[in-house]
Amino acid sequence: MITSTLETVPDKTIIEHLGIVQGSTVRAKHIGRDIMAGLKNIVGGELQGYTELLSEARDEAFERMIEQATAKGANAVINVRFSTSSVTQGASEILAYGSAVIVE
Amino acid sequence: MEAFIELWQILLVVVLLILAFFTGRIAELRHYKSIKRREHALGDLVVVVAKTLPPMSPAPATKLVRGSAVISVDYFKRFLARLRMIFGGRIHTYESLLDRARREAILRMQEQAQELGATMIFSMRFETSSISKGRKNAVGTVEVLAYGTAIIPQG
């Protein structure tokens, strides 16, 4: 599966557009991580726990998008975009979306 | 007794402010040092926002790469920012927070691309979100994501 933020795939032509594919996940913060984050809020610096948490969540959203594209019979997802929004306090939704296409 | 508790509370805030001033300052200086060193080392890997690829032959392989960082300001800077919100104007303390997070995210994306043997990153995009917008809507913690397409030359 080719994934790209570009509108085309180099040296290949798009033969069919299969529409939008998306994958999302909603994650809540872990209480243990929250305590550490509380400390870091005082001293400042990177919250590694959160960086990892969001990175894992993004991997999952991305995987779901790929699954959807595979189910549609695509071999590439182009123009991929990520989006993050906080649903409620302490939980955020991560979304990955793009256009599923068949390239040759 | 009540006066004593109040005094103790004020003292705690002052101690926290002093502690945060030093730790936050050290953390920021150290982070900027590391950012500058890595930016210098990764200077050859050009990051471009443009979408159209220049003609290359043979055609390169492409792969999506990303990097992210969650960074928080310290208590002292948050205190200054809250004061600023009364008078309005530029909040320098948050500017440096976002600058650090963004540069760190780009660096992580570049490191990922370098591992793949890429020479360029095209169509780079940013995504910023605030985490822990809890009490009194004080932001304080931001996540920045940088993502783009790594251009890997073939042959």
Image (spheres, rainbow, N blue to C red):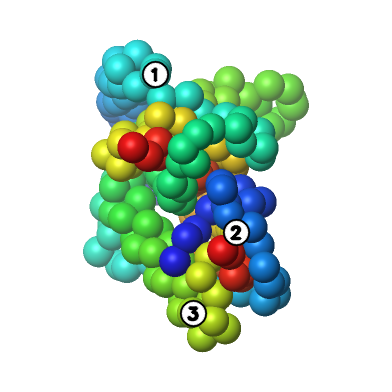
Residue B88 at what x, y percent from top left?
A: 74, 26
Q: Amino acid at mark 3?
A: Thr
Tell me the residue that label 2 is attached to. Answer: A78
Q: Secondary structure beneath disc 3?
A: helix
Answer whether residue B58 is visible to the viewer in this image: yes
Closer-to-camera residue (B79/A103): A103
In the rendered view, tell whether residue A97 sits above or below residue A21: above
Residue under disc 3 on the same chain as residue under disc 2: yes
Tell me if mark 2 has few (under 14), some (14-19) or many (20+) residues whose alpha carbon lies within 10 angstroms of its own. Answer: many
User: Which is more N-terminal, label 2 or label 3?
Assistant: 3
Q: Secondary structure beneath disc 2?
A: strand
Specify the farthest residue to the bottom.
Answer: A71
Point 49% across, 79% down: residue: A70
Tell me the residue that label 1 is attached to. Answer: B44
Residue A84 at what x, y percent from top left?
A: 57, 59
B103 sits to left or right of B8: right
Closer-to-camera residue (A8/B58): B58
A49 sits to left or right of A9: left
Which of the chains bears the disc numbered 2?
A: A
In the rendered view, tell whether residue B20 sits above or below residue A65: above
Q: Which mark is residue A70?
A: 3
Q: Amino acid at mark 1?
A: Asp
Residue under disc 1 on the same chain as residue under disc 2: no
Point 33% across, 37% down: residue: B155
Residue B80 at what x, y percent from top left?
A: 54, 26
Cα–Cα gap, marks 3 and 1: 35 Å
Which of the chains bears the disc numbered 3?
A: A
Q: Contact (CB < 8 A) between labels 3 and 2?
A: no
